[in-house]
Image (cartoon, grey):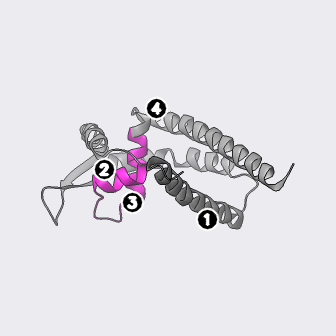
Amino acid sequence: MDEGEQIDRALRDFVWNIVEIHSQLGEIHKSWAQMLGITEPQWLILMAIDELDAGRGVSGIEVANKLKIHPPFVTSQTKRLETMNLLARDPSPDDARFVQLSLTQNAKTEIARLSTKRQALNSTMIEGLDGASLDYVNKRLSLIAKNSRLASQKLSIGML
C-alpha cells in the first residue's frame, strides 16, 4: 500500500470514528435531556448557554453559532425552556430588541444534580488519556474542523 492509499485509509477510519463518537454523544445527550424532561436539542442549548455565559447572558445568535443551528430554532426552543423555568430571556442592556439568555437557578440546580454522574461518564470517555494527550487531540481536531469547513465551502462553490 503506497502513502496515498495509507492516508486515504486513515482518513476513512478517522471519519468512521467521528461518526461513531457523534452517535454515542447523541445518545448520551439524549439521556441527560430525558433526566431533565427536555429534548436533546434543548439540552444542548442549555449546555451552550452554560459554557458561553460570562455573567451577562448570551445572545441566541451566539448559541446558534456554537451549536451550528439556525437562530430561529434557538428562539423557539429557548421560549419553551423559559416556560419550563430552565432559562431566563431578558432584554439586552445594549439593545432592547435582542434578548440575553441565561440559565435559571432551577436549571443550575438540576445540572449540578447531574454533575457526579457527568464526571463519572466523562472519566469513562477519556480513560487512558492524560490532560496533555487530550489537549493534543483537541488541537488537532480543531485544525481538522477548520480544514473541514474550508473543504465544505470549496465543495459548495464548485472549487473541488
62 left or right of 14 in image: left
* Alpha carbon separation for disc pair 1 and 3: 20 Å
The disc, 4 or 2, on the residue closer to the chain's N-terminal end is: 4
Q: Which residues are magenta?
A: 42-67
For disc 4, the marked residue is 34
- Magenta span includes 52: yes
- Magenta span includes 40: no
Residue kind at label 1, given as amino acid type:
Lys
Circle on res. 52:
3
Disc 4 residue crowd, few under 14, some 14–19, many 20+, Cα 10 Å = few
The prevailing secondary structure element of the residues shown in magenta is helix
Please state which of the two labelled residues, at mark 4 or mark 3, is closer to the viewer: 3
**Which residue is at a point 60% across and 58% down the rendered structure image?**
144
Give the camera-side residue of 141 and 83: 141
**Which residue is at a point 24% across and 40% down the rendered structure image?**
79
Q: Tell me where residue 93 sits by quadrant.
A: bottom left
Please state which of the two labelled residues, at mark 4 or mark 2, is closer to the viewer: 4
The disc, 2 or 3, on the residue closer to the chain's N-terminal end is: 3
Circle on res. 155:
none
